[in-house]
Amino acid sequence: METMLRSVAMSGYFDVTRRLGLNPAALAQQAGIDAAALANSDDRVPAAACCRLLELTAEKAACPTFALLMAETRQKFGTGVVNVLLAHKRTLREVLLAAVEYRHLLNEALAVYVENAGETVTIREELVVEPGTPTKQAIELALGVLARHSSALLADHWKPRAVHFTHAAHADLTFHRRFFGCPLEFGSDFNGFVCAAADLDYPNPAADPELVRYAESLVAPLDPMGTDSTALEVRKAIYLLLPLEQATVEPVARHLRLSVRTMQRQLELADTSFSALVEEVRRELAVRYMSNPRYPIGRVAALLGYAQQGSFTNWFALRFGMTPRDWRNSVGRRGK
């Protein structure tokens, strides 16, 4: 089943592309997207194709900050009942938790997880699309939009301690520094923000509990998760929780607000299983982490849930036909 997103997630694409002197409809067609569907915020378009479109446009425009230019157009939460619901929650923490709850109505490819650690909070975002899909621009768009929404909600009280990206840094980070206004960490373990826990609980001046309750009553009957979407949501949760050593049945079911029994039954109906999805995600993340020479192999093993490097080496050799060290040497030679 192809992962889709609502075209509203690409809001700003046409305006920014034209501003850079390019033809957005022609580029959309080149990426395999119906330009009319992309222009209609209520239509759905393939998530992987949108990722490719962002990369293609940034390359054609010679503009590495293309996604952040799109994010700059997002002054406030968009229209639609879910966005109204989010915009009027009492705190940013409640906004993020609601975004997780209604994730299947916002962007099927985007996974969000709020990790509490004492006085700090880590907001993790992950894009789960077909393996091999370039996501550098798409991740920067997702984090840029989160920053814009958080700033609109909290004004000067949005002061993240750092923003993290799993991809490598751009040659010139001047625009990124101005846009995010906080330290930048590239080549990180995750994509997301580290914030003070207190900032997430600062009151939203625009909060309206009555409006939120009304919006929730309208959202409730919309697009309930079916068996196919449950498999996708489990996969996304594993992406987020595996590096935290929490990608077991109970934490994943809890994250999805499902009972373990219900989750497993729906996975069976989708002709898959929890263990099969963990294996798929572990393999994909292994390629991501092993491709980053900054990560020692022992660190990769830990991020993939192995306490012992030897166990990871055995698993890797079975899946890839060579040891992690040989694989990394082979990839390094091909990259030269």
Image (spheres, rainbow, N blue to C red):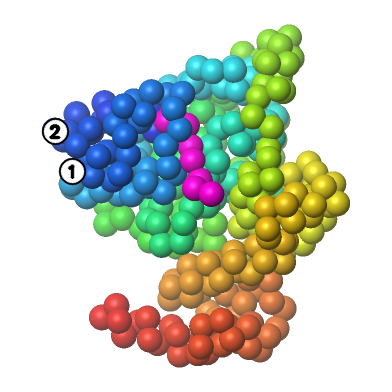
Which residue, given by chain and number where applicable, does mark 1 sit on? 61
Tag 2–tag 1 contact (CB < 8 Å):
yes
Q: Nearer the viewer, residue 74 or 227?
A: 227
Residue beneath the point at 77% across and 62% down = 248
Q: Is residue 50 visible?
A: yes
Q: Quadrant of residue 132?
A: bottom left
Residue beneath the point at 82% across and 47% down = 262
Q: Is residue 63 above or below residue 147?
A: below
Q: Separation of disc 2 and disc 1 at Cα?
A: 8 Å
Give the percent coordinates (x, y) of residue 214. Answer: 71, 11
Asked if the stretch drawn in magenta spans residue 2, the answer is: yes
Q: Is residue 93 visible?
A: no
- Look at the image and give the residue range highlighted in magenta: 1-8
> In the image, what residue type sits under mark 2?
Gly
Residue beneath the point at 65% across and 24% down = 222
**Tag shown at residue 21:** 2
Q: Quadrant of residue 207?
A: top right
Q: Quadrant of the C terminus?
A: bottom left
Sequence order check: which comes first, mark 2 or mark 1? 2
Left or right, residue 139 beside residue 128: left
Left or right, residue 212 beside residue 333: right
